[in-house]
Image (tube, grey):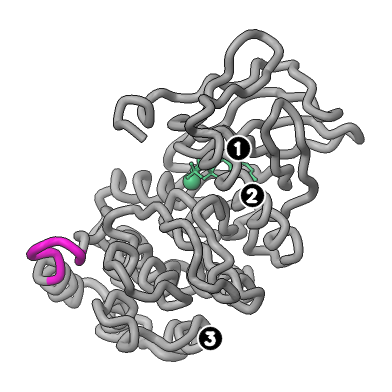
Amino acid sequence: MTQDSARIAPEPLPPGTMVDGYRIVSKIGAGGFGVVYRAISPTGQEVAVKEYLPGALARREGVNGAVTVAPEKNALYRMGMRCFLEEGRALAQISHPSVVNVLNFLHANDTVYLVMNYLEGASLQEFIMTAVGLKNPKVFRESTIRSLFDEVLGGLRVVHQHTMLHLDIKPANIFITEEDRAVLIDFGAARNVLHNDGKYLQPMFTPGFSGPEMRQKGSAIGPWTDIYAIGACIFSCMKGHPPPDTAVQDGAVRLRQYLQELRAVYSDSLVDLVADCMAITPTRRPHSVYALQKMLAPHEFVMEDSPPPPPPPQVANPWSERIKAFSKRLA
Ligand SMILES: Nc1ncnc2c1ncn2[C@@H]1O[C@H](COP(=O)(O)OP(=O)(O)OP(=O)(O)O)[C@@H](O)[C@H]1O
Ligand SMILES: [Mg+2]
């Protein structure tokens, strides 16, 4: 793949296009591997449809929606398509409020589509940007971070129980719904590697959120890789920007400096947890999502958020009130 070809954004399907009974309403996102649309199902349900359309390998030409692939890229295109489908199938077996719900698969236009529940809300990345704009001493309150990630970890635990990995956990791939639910989305980089004999595509990585093992040949990828990314997401909620990439020179040193600064703002136990998750050596990280959930549990820390204290929330999800407050400040 050349850089130029990778940069060309795939042409989305125009609104009104029918794909196997589903009516495309609008494009809601596009990445290197495909396009996400809002659509209406044959029964009138609002859904999100993710189309496999890797910009570096495929083009959409003409008006009939068909995807074309250059002959020399066909093998890779098909292999990517099989991964996309396999991941969708594995995901479809998972039913958890914090994991995006796959409803159906479609074959059309010489490509494949995943139909998911349509989520109303915004990504955690957008909430972080909003919170940074408020210029408070803390980007998110500690209690908010703990309960938000407890919910995310609940979903991730089930993903790992199904021997799947996410491998692209970052704030842009954690969705906060209007009902204040945190949902893991975008399993596009996931590989069912735990049952794999080692022949798998090297996943894409996002600097700052991917453990160094994602880039070291021969290093094993596993649940510990997702745990690294969770640590990096928690860091982002504390600092308001992604952590340094520990796979590059000085990255680990700079991370340690940032974490030291954060000790003035957040509890030692939360800072230590991030440091543990983002350890360069995977065996030094929490050994499972469950172990991490226990470390994150609110009773483990002393409530030290700065005065004046907010009135005690009357809801089961205290962080959701904070998120709502952010949204109101935006309006
Ligand atoms: N189920 C959904 N409901 C509502 N919006 C969604 C849903 N899934 C994805 N989106 C929206 O589409 C955007 C892109 O989705 P997603 O993260 O799955 O793909 P991507 O990042 O473009 O993909 P990739 O990294 O595989 O190229 C998300 O940030 C989100 O705004
Ligand atoms: Mg994404």
Kind of residue sitting beneath label 2 = Arg
What residue is shown with label 2? 82
Q: Which residues are magenta?
A: 246-252
Nearest to viewer (mark 2 / mark 1): 2
Nearest to viewer (mark 3 / mark 1): 1
- How far apart are the two marked residues, 3 and 2, measured between alpha carbons? 31 Å
Which mark sits nearer the N-terminus, 3 or 1? 1
Image quarter in which the N terminus is found:
top left
Q: Dot 2 lies on which element?
A: helix
The answer to whether residue 215 is above or below residue 66 is: below
Measured from the top left, where is residue 55 in percent x and y? 47, 30
The answer to whether residue 227 is above or below residue 32 is: below
Q: Dot 3 lies on which element?
A: helix
- Are the residues tagged 2 and 1 within 8 Å (C-beta)? no
Where residue 113 sits, quadrant-wise, is: top right
Q: Is residue 314 visible?
A: no
Residue 52's disc number: 1
The answer to whether residue 281 is above or below residue 140 is: below
Q: Is residue 101 left or right of residue 207?
A: right
Within-10-Å neighbours for mark 3: few <14, some 14–19, many 20+: some
- Are the residues tagged 3 and 1 within 8 Å (C-beta)? no
The answer to whether residue 9 is above or below residue 51 is: above
Q: Is residue 80 magenta?
A: no
- How far apart are the two marked residues, 2 and 1, measured between alpha carbons? 10 Å
Residue 140's disc number: none
What residue is shown with label 3? 290
Measured from the top left, where is residue 200 in percent x and y? 50, 61
* Dominant SS type (magenta): loop
- How far apart are the two marked residues, 3 and 1, measured between alpha carbons? 33 Å
Which mark sits nearer the N-terminus, 2 or 1? 1
